């Protein structure tokens, strides 16, 4: 019937076949068929406006899911390549530029694209460092594609050593700013956004409306640790920068171009100009450092190397010139005079912005930016009393090539003459002043500034976070890779389906192979969710799961605790601001209870290679295997010091003080819990019988200082590394050392 359904063109024949097919159906099949037909007919008559919620982008009118022309994969070094990319991927003359890789940056990129699509946006152009990486990315997002540039700077490792960045990262971020400058010159509005930015609302809804629409550059403010520092902010956090309605040869376009141009001129010069002044060759390799260095020139209206001349000094030079540096700093501060150059105002907001802001008015920190110039032919570009000029005397291949790209991006407007060229004064003066805004924290801020205080949680803010763009960066998290992904999970913006599609079943920090799913040892929730749990008891349970996990070669399930415990965040956690405690990350669990994840072990060193899973990872693990292998706590999965746990599910486990247990006793208890139906031990072929073991009381494994091997290593583990016996059998003394080393790395306060 299926074949005839699609092959018969004659309607009568088709209906005859359908009638005969229905007659052959069982009563159950007929019932299902008629039900599905009735539902389909009903749904077809429901107006589309009832079927789905309005997309967030409809307020700004910049929805683009059906507006972009197609995908683009290719080189944007040439004018033709760039124009084709912008033509294919833009909408409403808007483009969002993201960075990606085929490695760790792939999932953040894909999650960010999902965020944008949820809001109704598709005008995205991902950038990669080379063709191979770009093609790998494009396989995951064929409807979008990817761009790369064959023009590179040729950065090598020794150049970036002190910057903390690898050459590939420097090249990629340079491509981002180069592409943004060319796009702005070509008349596009550009949103530069890191892939650790979470979007809770349509940013255009705010940036395109009063009072924000009068600014040409809107950027995240660089704040240290609290939103109350905003009234003193003057620096930019490069994680979020938006350029709109900028004149192609005006101040905003100059600022973007200069971020790339300064670095290229130093590269052309072989860093001779920097080394002649005892400055580090990796000076301003970090794009945010260069951005703020250039910002000073644009705000002052004169070329100046505000950060470079001091912050890029080699350590020996800095120590030697301590007194001279302080005097230089004071002269630079006097020239910049940020207090008078940054205008602070309190403005009225549109009603739709009140919830995110928490008020009907907001403070804004803005500044006028100009194309800088040096007036007077006999004047130095930068006088020596301000550190002198760091521009090489002549341009080289890279910077000349970049100027040609800028010129061809806007053939009807002139590229700014160099400061050495007397014509630059008249050209600069002819450009109107533009405006730059440091976005208020409720519009754009890092986790430390707003997220930790609870403003990003829907459940604490009447269903809608009081944040628009959330930069998931935190100085207190020990690993940016783990920490940023964990924060996505905290706010329900981590796409697990996407993660499994990219990584396979083992889409966890602990997984070393896409098919490897960790077996977990964790604490029974009855013990860690107690209202009277003390920090000492929590640490006792942590020690216990570490010891048992190392003994059984299982993965630690790091436990979460109630946030309202007095030693965590304290009581009354119903609305922001929550008490700030960098040691704990609040999140809502699957039961809508506010729990706190311990930040100390959130690093690949404590989770990677089967070492641990976070509380939110473990929740997903349980949900993933709920039908076939339920992993919820139960008496038969609970490990205690003696015998089995009480089989009565209705009783909560009581707290018991830590009990010492020796090697042989633990072996007996572990074997008892880990026995599977029909098996005395855990066989390697039981790959689909994934286990979770819950500790029902704190255990203190007593190690004997001898060389006797661990007898429980006779049972086999499902992880590949154990199956292949790649690790030798360890003695109790070895385990004692392992336990001590792991505690120093992942439990005790960092040194």
Image: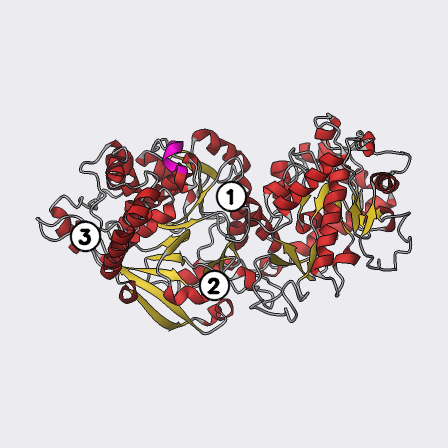
- Characterize the local packing of mark 1: few (<14), some (14-19) or many (20 or more) Cα atoms within 10 angstroms: many
**Callout 2 secondary element:** loop
Asked whether 525 or 515 is in front, the reply is 525
**Callout 3 secondary element:** helix
In the picture, the disc for residue 385 is 3
Asked whether 188 or 254 is in front, the reply is 254
In the rendered image, residue 629, in percent from the top left (x then y), is placed at 80, 43
Residue 37 placement, left or right of 187: right
Residue 247 appears in the rendering: no
Disc 2 to disc 3, C-alpha distance = 35 Å
Magenta segment: does it hold 160? yes
**Circle 1 or circle 3, nearest the eye:** 3
The stretch of residues the image draws in magenta is 156-161
For the point 64% across and 71% down, which residue is it?
572
Residue placed under numbered mark 1 in the picture: 109
Disc 1 to disc 3, C-alpha distance = 45 Å
Residue placed under numbered mark 2 in the picture: 226
Asked whether 272 or 97 is in front, the reply is 272
Residue 108 appears in the rendering: yes
- The image shows a total of numbered marks equal to 3
In the rendered image, residue 282, in percent from the top left (x then y), is placed at 35, 39
Residue 251 placement, left or right of 462: left
Comes first in the chain, label 2 or label 3: 2
In the rendered view, tell whether residue 135 sits above or below residue 252. Answer: above
Give the prevailing secondary structure in the magenta stretch: helix
In the rendered image, residue 442, in percent from the top left (x then y), is placed at 47, 64
**Circle 2 or circle 1, nearest the eye:** 2
Residue 320 placement, left or right of 668: left
Magenta segment: does it hold 8? no
């Amino acid at each position: 019937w299926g074949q005839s359904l699609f092959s018969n063109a004659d309607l009568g024949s088709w209906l005859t076949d359908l009638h005969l097919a229905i007659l052959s159906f069982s009563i159950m099949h007929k019932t299902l068929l008629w039900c599905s037909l009735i539902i389909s007919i009903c749904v077809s008559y429901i107006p589309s406006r009832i079927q789905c919620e309005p997309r967030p982008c409809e307020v700004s009118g910049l929805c683009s899911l059906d507006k972009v022309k197609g995908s683009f994969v290719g080189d944007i070094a040439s004018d033709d390549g760039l124009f084709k990319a912008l033509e294919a991927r833009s909408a409403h003359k808007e483009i969002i530029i993201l960075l990606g890789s085929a490695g760790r940056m792939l999932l953040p990129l894909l999650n960010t694209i999902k965020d944008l699509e949820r809001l109704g946006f598709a005008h995205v152009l991902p950038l990669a460092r080379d063709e191979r990486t770009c093609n790998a990315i494009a396989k995951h997002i064929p409807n979008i594609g990817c761009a790369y540039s064959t023009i590179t700077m040729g950065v090598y490792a020794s150049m970036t050593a002190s910057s903390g960045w690898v050459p590939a990262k420097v090249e990629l971020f340079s491509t981002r700013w180069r592409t943004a400058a060319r796009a702005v010159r070509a008349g596009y509005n550009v949103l530069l956004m890191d892939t650790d930015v979470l979007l809770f609302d349509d940013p255009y809804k705010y940036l395109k409306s009063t009072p924000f629409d009068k600014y040409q550059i809107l950027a995240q403010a660089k704040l240290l640790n609290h939103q109350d520092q905003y009234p003193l902010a003057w620096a930019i956090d490069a994680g979020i920068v938006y350029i709109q309605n900028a004149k192609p040869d005006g101040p905003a376009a100059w600022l973007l171009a200069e971020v790339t141009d300064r670095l290229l001129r130093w590269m052309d010069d072989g860093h001779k100009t920097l080394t002649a002044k005892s400055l580090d060759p990796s000076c301003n390799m970090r794009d945010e450092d260069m951005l703020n260095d250039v910002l000073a020139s644009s705000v002052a209206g004169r070329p100046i190397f505000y950060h470079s001349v001091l912050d890029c000094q080699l350590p020996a030079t800095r120590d030697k010139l301590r007194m001279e540096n302080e005097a230089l700093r004071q002269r630079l501060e006097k020239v910049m005079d940020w207090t008078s150059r940054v205008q602070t105002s309190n403005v009225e907001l549109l009603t739709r912005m009140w919830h995110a802001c928490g008020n009907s008015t907001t403070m804004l920190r803005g500044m006028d930016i100009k194309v800088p110039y040096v007036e007077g032919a006999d004047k130095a570009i930068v006088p020596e009393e301000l550190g002198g000029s760091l521009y090489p005397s002549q341009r080289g291949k890279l910077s000349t090539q970049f100027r040609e790209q800028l010129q061809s991006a806007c053939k009807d407007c002139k590229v700014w003459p160099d400061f050495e060229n007397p014509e630059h004064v008249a050209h600069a003066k002819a450009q109107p002043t533009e405006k730059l805004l440091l976005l208020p924290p409720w519009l754009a801020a890092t986790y430390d500034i707003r997220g930790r205080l609870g403003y990003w949680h829907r459940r604490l803010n009447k269903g809608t976070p009081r944040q628009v763009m959330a930069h998931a960066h935190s100085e207190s998290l020990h690993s940016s890779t783990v920490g940023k992904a964990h924060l996505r999970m905290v706010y329900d913006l981590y796409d697990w389906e996407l993660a499994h599609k990219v990584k396979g079943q083992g889409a966890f920090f602990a997984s070393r192979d896409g098919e490897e799913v960790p077996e977990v040892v964790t604490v029974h929730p009855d013990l860690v969710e107690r209202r009277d749990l003390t920090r000492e008891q929590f640490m006792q349970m942590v020690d216990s799961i570490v010891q048992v996990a190392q003994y059984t070669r299982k993965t630690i399930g790091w436990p979460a605790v109630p946030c309202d415990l007095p030693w965590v965040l304290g009581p009354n956690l119903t609305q922001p601001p929550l008490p700030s405690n960098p040691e704990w990350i609040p999140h809502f669990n699957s039961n809508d209870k506010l729990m706190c994840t311990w930040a100390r072990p959130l690093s690949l060193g404590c989770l990677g290679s089967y070492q641990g899973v976070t509380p939110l990872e473990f929740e997903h693990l349980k949900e993933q295997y709920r039908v076939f292998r339920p992993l919820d706590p139960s008496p038969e999965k609970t490990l205690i010091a003696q015998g089995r746990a009480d089989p009565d599910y209705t009783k909560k486990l009581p707290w018991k003080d830590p009990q010492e247990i020796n090697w042989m006793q633990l072996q007996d208890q572990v074997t008892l819990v880990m026995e599977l139906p029909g098996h005395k031990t855990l066989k390697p072929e039981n790959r689909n019988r994934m286990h979770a073991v819950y500790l029902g009381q704190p255990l203190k494994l007593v190690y004997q200082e001898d060389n006797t091997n661990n007898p429980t290593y006779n049972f086999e583990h499902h992880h590949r590394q154990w199956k292949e016996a790649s690790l030798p059998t360890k003695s109790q003394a070895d385990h004692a050392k392992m336990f001590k080393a792991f505690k120093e790395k992942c439990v005790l306060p960092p040194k």
